[in-house]
Amino acid sequence: MLEATLDAATVLTGEPQRLILDRAYDSDPLRDRLEQRGIDMICPHRTNRIKAARQDGRRLRRYKRRWVVERTIGWLQNFRRLVVRWEHKLLMYRAFVHVACLMIALRRF
């Protein structure tokens, strides 16, 4: 389904350079097909993998930073006003995003 999603993506202007994915996508045939398309697949190997690992830890450094983005989006979704957009003007919506980020930062420190 990943390849069908990439084919149907109208937002992309071309093929992405790399995809950072979960362990669930760890599949050698999928890696091969994405490599043929020129896409670098970055995902950790499953713990029960029988075959030898196909990527080293250097590329997985990008995967470690993925948590920061997902966690931040999760924190922002705690604010109902951002999840359900009632404002018609983008300026007001962005203002509430900034207020939410400020509140998250104040809670963290």
Image (cartoon, grey):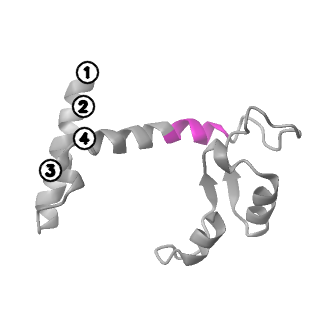
Question: What is the C-alpha distance between the residues marked 2 and 3?
Answer: 14 Å
Looking at the image, residue 82 lies above or below residue 66: below
> Residue 100: x percent and y percent?
19, 42
Instruction: Report the residue marked by disc 1.
Output: 109
Label 1 environment density (alpha carbons within 10 Å; few <14, some 14–19, many ≥20): few
> Residue 71: x percent and y percent?
40, 38
Residue 90 sits inside the magenta stretch: no
Instruction: Report the residue marked by disc 3.
Output: 96
Please indicate whether residue 101 sits to the left or right of residue 27 in the image: left
Label 4 environment density (alpha carbons within 10 Å; few <14, some 14–19, many ≥20): few
Question: What is the C-alpha distance between the residues marked 1 and 2?
Answer: 6 Å
Q: Which region is colored magenta?
A: 60-66
For the C terminus, which image quadrant?
top left
Instruction: Report the residue marked by disc 2.
Output: 105
Mark closer to the chain start, 3 or 1: 3
Find residue 78 and name its label.
4
Circle nearer the viewer, 4 or 3 = 4
Mark closer to the chain start, 2 or 3: 3
Kind of residue at badge 2: Ala
Label 2 environment density (alpha carbons within 10 Å; few <14, some 14–19, many ≥20): few
Residue 64 sits inside the magenta stretch: yes
